[in-house]
Image (cartoon, helix red, strand yellow):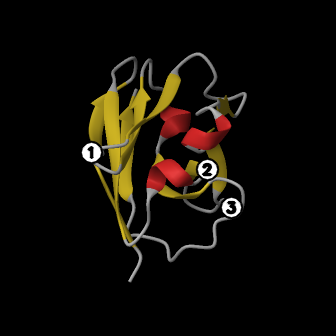
């Protein structure tokens, strides 16, 4: 059974940093393009960062809104995907999820709430 568990969210002041983790079971994250998504209240879920599989070089891509501030990475031993978020602002407030980066076909986890106070 495939399961993704996100963690690391919290309340942070504007300009602060957080690191999110996504631990996978039943899936080998290094063999897949993985992505971080977020959903703010009243909005659609959006893709913010992807990292390609190890066979595709682990290339990263970012939404324009987070480029230069967020970094996606992967620990192949821990089977975990991370999202380092720096210089956070109020527009980053959302529930963050991970899933496949090309098409989110896996069951969604519970997500992790990130709240940025100004």
Q: Are marks 3 and 2 in contact (CB under 8 Å)?
A: no
Question: What residue is shown with label 1?
Answer: 8
Question: What residue is shown with label 2?
Answer: 33
Which element type, helix, strand or loop, lies under badge 1? loop
- Note whether 101 is above or below 3 in the view shown: above
Q: Do the residues labelled 2 and 1 touch (CB within 8 Å)?
A: no
**Residue under the image location 46 percent in, 54 percent down:** 29
Q: Where is residue 45 in the image (x, y as percent from the top left)?
A: 64, 59
Cα distance in 3D space between marks 1 and 3: 22 Å
Cα distance in 3D space between marks 2 and 1: 21 Å
Question: What residue is shown with label 3?
Answer: 44
Q: How crowded is mark 3: few (under 14 residues within 10 Å), some or many (20 or more)?
A: few
Q: Furthest-bottom residue in view? A: 1
| Residue 49 appears in the rendering | no
**Residue under the image location 67 percent in, 32 percent down:** 61
Q: Which of marks 1 and 3 is in front?
A: 1
């Amino acid at each position: 059974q495939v399961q993704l568990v996100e963690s690391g969210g919290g309340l942070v002041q504007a300009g602060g940093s957080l690191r999110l983790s996504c631990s996978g079971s039943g899936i080998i994250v290094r063999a897949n393009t993985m992505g971080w998504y977020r959903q703010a209240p009243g909005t659609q879920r959006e893709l913010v960062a992807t990292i390609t599989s190890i066979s595709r070089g682990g290339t990263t891509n970012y939404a324009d809104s987070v480029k230069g501030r967020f970094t996606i990475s992967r620990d192949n031993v821990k089977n975990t995907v991370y999202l380092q978020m720096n210089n956070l602002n109020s527009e980053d407030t959302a529930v963050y999820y991970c899933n496949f980066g090309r098409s989110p076909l896996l069951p969604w986890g519970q997500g992790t709430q990130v709240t940025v106070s100004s």
